[in-house]
Image (cartoon, rainbow, N blue to C red):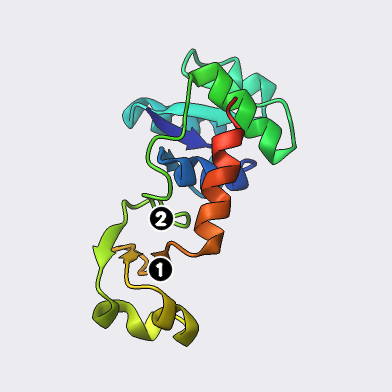
Amino acid sequence: MNLLCDHMLGTLAKWLRFMGYDTAYPGPLDDTELLALAQREDRVLLTRDKELAGRSHRALRVHSDDLEEQIREVASALNLRLIDPLSRCSLCNTPLVAARLEEVGDLVPEGVRARHTSFWQCPTCHRVYWQGSHWTKMVERLSRLPA
């Protein structure tokens, strides 16, 4: 399932990406442009705007302003689950690729280089990820949310 978050749902977009979902988050667009983008890219539009949500059968209105409740709400309505945690860049939505320390060493803190051997990098924005304590905590948090 491909998703599109409007400009009011940037943090939700980031967390849906952490769950493994292709989640677009464009800059501010007017309603017509958002609806056209959702249609063109076959995405479900997520929005807090009641009027906008009512204009398309492929839109879902998100009621809460609390992140965890938003995730529960969307996961319940769209039957989303943790599918491929942390497989997409949280910043730009690009799928991550495995990287060797030699390729990303200059982008990783020295302590991390000493403790980890597996890394992933975004081929678009070059952000580097590794399975540190933050990774485990995020997966645990996401595993609890959609229930």
Q: What's the residue type where badge 2 is placed?
A: Cys
User: Tag on residue 127?
Assistant: 1
Q: Residue at x 47, y 26 (%)?
A: 80
Identify the image quadrant of the C terminus: top right
Name above or below for residue 30 compared with residue 107: above
User: Is 102 positioned to the left or the right of 115 in the image?
Assistant: left
Q: Residues within 10 Å of mark 2 (few under 14, many from 20)?
A: many
Is residue 69 positioned above or below 105 on the image?
Answer: above
Residues under numbered marks 1 and 2 in contact, where contact means CB atoms less than 8 Å apart: yes
What residue would you read off at disc 2?
A: 89
Residue 31 in which image quadrant? top right
Question: Does residue 90 lie above or below 56 as drawn?
Answer: below
Q: Quadrant of the N terminus?
A: top left
Q: CA distance from mark 1 to mark 2?
A: 8 Å
Q: Nearer the viewer, residue 33 or 24?
A: 24
- Work out whether residue 103 can be spotted: yes
Closest to the observer, 45 or 126: 126
Q: Nearer the viewer, residue 82 or 26?
A: 82
Q: Residues within 10 Å of mark 1 (few under 14, many from 20)?
A: some
Identify the residue shown where x is 58% and y is 28%. 146
Which kind of residue does numbered mark 1 sit on?
Answer: Arg
Q: Residue at x 60, y 34 (%)?
A: 144
Q: Is residue 57 above or below residue 107?
A: above
